Image: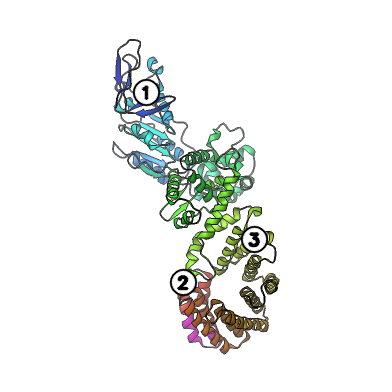
Amino acid sequence: MSERPPIEASGERAVAVGSNSGIVSTGEHATIDARTVHLSLDAVQQPADVPAPRGTTNLPAPAHPDFVDRVEPLARLEAALAEPSPAVPPVVHGLGGTGKSALALQVAHRHRHRLNPVWWLSADSASSLTHGLADLAARLAPHPHLATSTSTERAEWALSWLQAHQDWLLVLDDAASPHDLAPVLGVTTGRHIITSRRATGWRRLAQSLPLDSLPPDAAVELLMRTIESYEPDDEPTLTSLARELGNLPLALEQAAAYIDSTAITPAAYLNRLRRYPGRMFAATASGQEADDQRTVARIWQLSIQAITNQQPLAGDLLRLFAWFAPAPLPRDALEVLHEGLGEDLLAVDEALALLSDYSMINLSRQAVTVHRLVQAVARVPDPADPHRTIQDITRARERATLLLEQALPENPLFNVAGWPRWRQLLPHVMALTGQTPTEEKDLHTAGLLVAASGYLQGDHQASAALSCAKQAVDIHTRLQGPDHPATLTARSFLASAHRAVGDLQAALPLHEQNLAAHEHVHGLDHPDTLVARANLAYLYALRGELARARDLHQQNLTDMQHLHGPDHPHTINARANLASAYRDMGDLQTAIDLHRQAVIDYERVYGTDHAETVTARSNLAYAHRLAGQVDVATALFERVLSDRIRLYGPDHPLTELARQFLE
């Protein structure tokens, strides 16, 4: 590489000063490069001959007085600094607002009396880095000629000084690019601490020290320490507030400052946060001297802008993820982005990698997880933010709905093989449907709610199933009318959910209304009519109207056999329902015969280990017990218990029910 032309020195002899790495100015932006800088011989002192004044530091503030529960990260950072020189410097990386700078500052203050100088450098750009090094040069050697030279020349002198001395510490804060730091990190006679939102690109330059949000107890402790008006009765609210803020240190401090400045209670702040999240994430305390750029919204706006400028799809994905739960989203569910939503698969990979690099998501081979505050900011429109327009956020919600709709297994009541998938995706369904404004919930939203209600009823989460079904009925009624087939289906799920929570009085008119509507719209022998009749018969049995229940079940079995044949699942269900009706009426031998046939049918159609087969086996066992055939019943119940432990786990209500039958 050719040298830069010498700087004119009024005819005086010039001398080269520098190390193997240098800094070159290009227009307004100074960048580090491997060039030699030429200065007048009497303009500078040789760097090796200049001692650092005792206590040379520019640390921005004393160690944070409310620095809580960072024992493990502090220990890891201290251990990295204690490694023999030359050591691989540590880079503390994580989401904006997790306290990376506070952690580095804490350690830097601890080493002020051992290392000299201890110098804080903004590393968000090559230009910032140059100016920080230039300031260090001015502090070390305030020679009048050096003071009047360019920032690039002073920065080069500082690098030469660092190369010639030992036992110093540079804190390179908020590093935007590993490449920008390479020449500075190449000076290995001292120590470096790096903080960055970038999680990757450091492999050959620094050792990774990821930093997460605070543990829940520590987050509450931070609020209690920083809210001057804190009262002991506030602690339960502070727990909720910390959880709402995702235990993020910056957000906690921002909330505490606002609470004290406005003299409101933590409960009032929490209420405002839930009602106006976008404004609260951007709010600073009244009269606060702190830089308003250090709000949660502003920090992430800058990150999102940088990400979107590099890869627009990354911004789209972040807005899409904002509608899901702050829980792991399976990576394979994202295949829908390619297969169903038309995105280029490699572009999706690149966008995910970029979001992970900026710590906006946690990415593993199995799942994607997004911090709840990142989600909250990304889904709130902001007229001042071009990346959070109403149109973009609405489109992201619609795409998130379609993604879940296509990723969920069908027929959640009977598709047992799909239940593990449902358990993974249910939190995201509930988050998306819960965050969608009522007036904007469409038929796709209703479809998610109906499916969720079916799964939740099968999983014996009756209250949640009831809420989902109510919402689905309201959506279908508003958009399609009360007698539309989709409305009737949703109403059937609602009636069943009322029945599951034990509210038979509310379930009865819904089931009766549904049967009448199906008979009117579809006719007496339509499959949906027969399902509605079976639901009403089951409810009659629960109400003690046993003869009415038996007659409807008998009619259904006859119609199902005629309509579907003897081996159809609906026919098998009808036979099992009729068996239960005879059992409830005390005709145990007829019930046992029908239950035994139902088990045989379920095993043939569903398999021996299917949940419906296990339920049929449990019903047969119960009929044998009522008939006094204890040994037969016990053997069947033991098998049922084993199957339910495998299907649901040891603590599920159905597992516990099977266990009770064996006591």
Amino acid marked by disc 1: Pro
Q: Nearer the viewer, residue 314 or 236?
A: 314
Identify the secondary structure beneath mark 1: loop
**Closer to the N terminus: mark 1 or mark 2?**
1
- Determine if the magenta segment contains residue 627: yes
Q: Nearer the viewer, residue 46 or 592?
A: 592
Q: Which residue is mark 3?
A: 471
The residues colored magenta run: 621-638
Give how far across and how far down residue 558 sits, in percent. Answer: 61, 83
Q: Which residue is mark 1?
A: 53
Give yes or no for contact between labels 1 and 2 (Cβ–Cβ under 8 Å): no
| 495 up-or-down from 135: above or below | below
Give how far across and how far down residue 143 sits, in percent. Answer: 38, 16
Give how far across and how far down residue 70 sits, in percent. Answer: 44, 44
Q: Which residue is mark 2?
A: 645
Q: Which corner quadrant of the image does residue 496 belong to?
A: bottom right
